[in-house]
Amino acid sequence: MSFRVAICSLAFFSFFLGILLSKYSILTRQRAMLLTILPTSMIIGAFWHSPRLPNSSLPPAQSDYSSWIVEIASLPKRTTKNYKYQIHTILFCNPNDTPTRWDTNALLYLNAADSSAGTLQPGDIMILTSPITPFKKSDSISPFDFSSWARTHGIAGTAFASSRTLFPLHARNNSLRYKNLRVHGKIIQKFRSLGIEQPELGPIVAMTLGERSELSADINQHFRNSGLAHILAISGFHVGIIFLVFQYLTKPLITRSFYSSIVRNLIPMCFVWLYAAFCGFAPSIVRAATILTIYASNYAFQMKINRLEAFFISLAIVLLAQSSAPFDVGFYLSFLAVAGIATFLPFLQSTMRLQRMKNFKKTIQLFNISLSAQIATTPLILSAFRSFPIIGIIASIPASLLAFPILIGGMGIALLPETTCIASLLAIPLKWASKSLIFISQTADRLNPHILSNIFLPNSVIVLYSCAVIFLAFYTQFRKKILFYVSASTFIGAIILAIL
């Protein structure tokens, strides 16, 4: 079952949901149709029409005399023997032909001993005389196919260069994106000047700037195997921290007037979007900031929009802004996690009876939020990564607690001059928190039983399970028995298909 067929099935299911909501007077017909058909129709449009994805092909004829005009599109990532850059091609030149504009991306490797390695800056325009070699399809049984991932993200191949095959044009692209990346490079140097080096530097840079260039392969693998990779990827969790911090700082401005709710919700949202701009408007942070903006605006202006309506409105806005979003598995994980929290969190909170455990209330709430999101996203995680780290649910609690000082301390150092004593004082607990986070990921990786591994689930099972979660979310909101019955039957259908 292809991914397109799965999306079309989800669209049909959403249409059925809209009919059900209007037939039983759960929502008015107009609102039900708007909230269900609009997002899924945009998903179908993104798949069947031309999404704004980069080209992932190469010219058919590359000779020894061919050359490229490229620009450096990332910060350098140091490996054992090389520096790795992402480059964006501008022109392809053959000796006997007119230069052709060629818009694609590639990975560039420079030997660490080369004079130009590590000195290239984002936006630098270069002449590359080395050929760009396309990726070979993997023959291994690994669940992750890098060649397919690269094609989806518009990365066509790799090039190995040296100072003899890479020449500067003494020109630079000064677009906002590249200026932002150069600022990130200066902040990374600031961290190093304060005594923060590898391996502690990697998680700090990833969580503060959204840059994974300083993450070593070993540390990255520990976080993936332990199920804590979401801590490093800037998402709704990090956006929520920024929002809560500034909401707390604006507390003295709150009065009993109508404008107090506006101040308490919209001022923190402005800082959230500034943080999104600082991180280069990565798709994951834009999704999270959009969802949070809809919810915050609902409370700020006291609009009568329930949480599920806000969920579908934010889904529609994200799809309008990013037509390529359905090609990213993070898109589905983000919204399924939000639906899972809306569905399972009230049940877990009532089951735990938090009023009797006041001393551990915040810790238990954090665990319940993590567990709710994991329940909703488990089938999709199994399908995408072919494994599910069970120990990661427990390890995410101390990891989440450590993420707060890392994010706040990292942002503080990024905004302060490195010569101030406050920056030097912040560097000490920041380094300790990053070291503790790495230790947790390594311990969880060693203890992880990997019971759920090498499991393949067809797309039909994922679609049915996701729809069951959405139906259950509507049941928790409106308490209509028909929604519970449909959710239960859909869930049973998913189990039967998984067994067969």
Image (cartoon, helix red, strand yellow):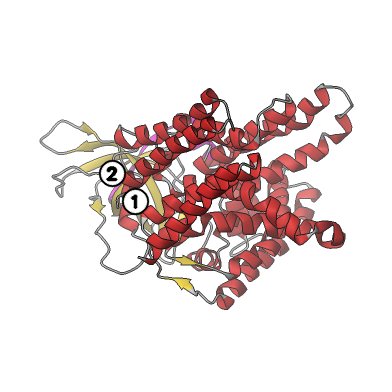
Residue 202 falls in image quadrant:
bottom right
Name the foreground residue: 376 vs 253. Answer: 376
Image: magenta residue range: 162-180
Question: Residue at left 68%, top 28%?
Answer: 297
Circle 1 SS class: helix
Residue 66 falls in image quadrant:
top left
Name the foreground residue: 313 vs 146. Answer: 313
Q: Amino acid at mark 2?
A: Ser
Residue 266 falls in image quadrant:
top right
64 displayed left or right of 292: left
Question: Residue at left 53%, top 77%?
Answer: 449
Q: Amino acid at mark 1?
A: Ala
Q: Which residue is mark 1?
A: 150
Circle 2 SS class: loop
| Residue at mark 2 to residue at mark 1: CA–CA distance | 8 Å
Q: Which residue is mark 2?
A: 56
Whether the residues at callouts 2 and 1 have beta carbons within 8 Å, the answer is yes
The quadrant in which the C terminus is found is bottom left
Name the foreground residue: 196 vs 296. Answer: 296
Q: Residues within 10 Å of mark 2 (few under 14, many from 20)?
A: some
Question: Residue at left 56%, top 75%?
Answer: 448
| Residue 149 pos. (x, y %) | 35, 52
168 drawn magenta: yes
373 displayed left or right of 37: right
Q: Say if residue 192 shows up in the picture.
A: no
220 displayed left or right of 405: left
Q: Which mark is residue 257?
A: none
Q: Say if residue 311 shows up in the picture.
A: yes
